[in-house]
Amino acid sequence: MKLRKSEIIVFLIILLSLAISIYFYPKLPDKIASHWNYKGEVDGYMVKPWGIFLMPVVLLFLFLLFLILPKIDPMKANVEKFRKYFDGFIILLFLFMLAIHLQTISWTMGVKIKPNVFFPVGLGILFYYLGILMNNSKRNWFIGLKTPWTLSSDLVWDNTHKFG
C-alpha cells in the first residue's frame, strides 16, 4: 500500500503528537486541563494518562477512518476528482487538533494562553477551507451535503454545494 504525500504528513503529525505526549508525560501533574468555559477558565480535568494520550489516539483513529472511507465509497472515482482539496482539509484538521493538544499541555505546564483567543481563529480557518472543499467536491457518499436529491444528480450536487 503506497501512501500519498498528504497521508505521510498526517502520519508525521500523529507521531509528533505522540512524541510530545511521551516527552511531557513525566513533567505533568496528575490532572490535565481538558475543558475551558466561555471565559477561558478551566472547568474540566482528566487524569494524566487520558489527558495526555487521548489526542494521539483520536488522531490515529481519524487517520485510519480517512484512509478507509474513500476506498469504500461507491463513487470513489469522484473522490479522486477533488482529492487535493480533501487532503488539504485533512491536513488542516490534524494541524488544528495538534494545536489543541499543544494548548492543553502548555496550559497544564503553566503557559496560560486562553483558548477562547486561539480556537475561534482555528475554527474560522477550518470553516473557510470547508467551504472551499464543499464547493469543489463531487458526488460521493461520505463528504458533503447528502440528500437523496444531491446523490442522484451531479447538477443538483454541484448547485447545492455552491449554495451551501
Image (spheres, rainbow, N blue to C red):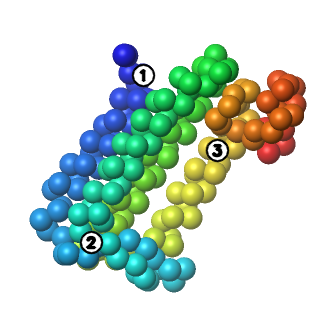
Distance CA(mark 2)–CA(mark 3): 33 Å
**Percent x, y of residue 23:** 15, 56
Residue 22 in view (yes/no): yes
Foreground residue, 75 or 98? 75
Residue for badge 3? 130
**Percent x, y of residue 143:** 65, 36
Residue for badge 2? 47
Q: Report whether 79 appears left or right of 16.
A: right
Mark number, residue 45:
none
Of the residues shown, which amino acid type is indicated by label 3? Leu
> Who comes first in sequence, dot 1 or dot 2?
1
Q: Are marks 3 and 1 in contact (CB under 8 Å)?
A: no
User: What is the secondary structure assignment of the residue under circle 1?
Assistant: loop
Q: Residues within 10 Å of mark 1 (few under 14, many from 20)?
A: few
Distance CA(mark 1)–CA(mark 2): 36 Å
Of the residues shown, which amino acid type is indicated by label 1? Arg
Q: Are marks 1 and 2 in contact (CB under 8 Å)?
A: no
> Who comes first in sequence, dot 3 or dot 1?
1
Residue at (32, 43) in percent of width and height: 14
Residue at (64, 16) in percent of width and height: 77
Residue at (64, 44) in percent of width and height: 130
**Percent x, y of residue 153:** 85, 25
Residue for badge 1? 4
Foreground residue, 160 or 147? 147
Residue at (50, 80) in percent of width and height: 37
Distance CA(mark 3)–CA(mark 1): 21 Å
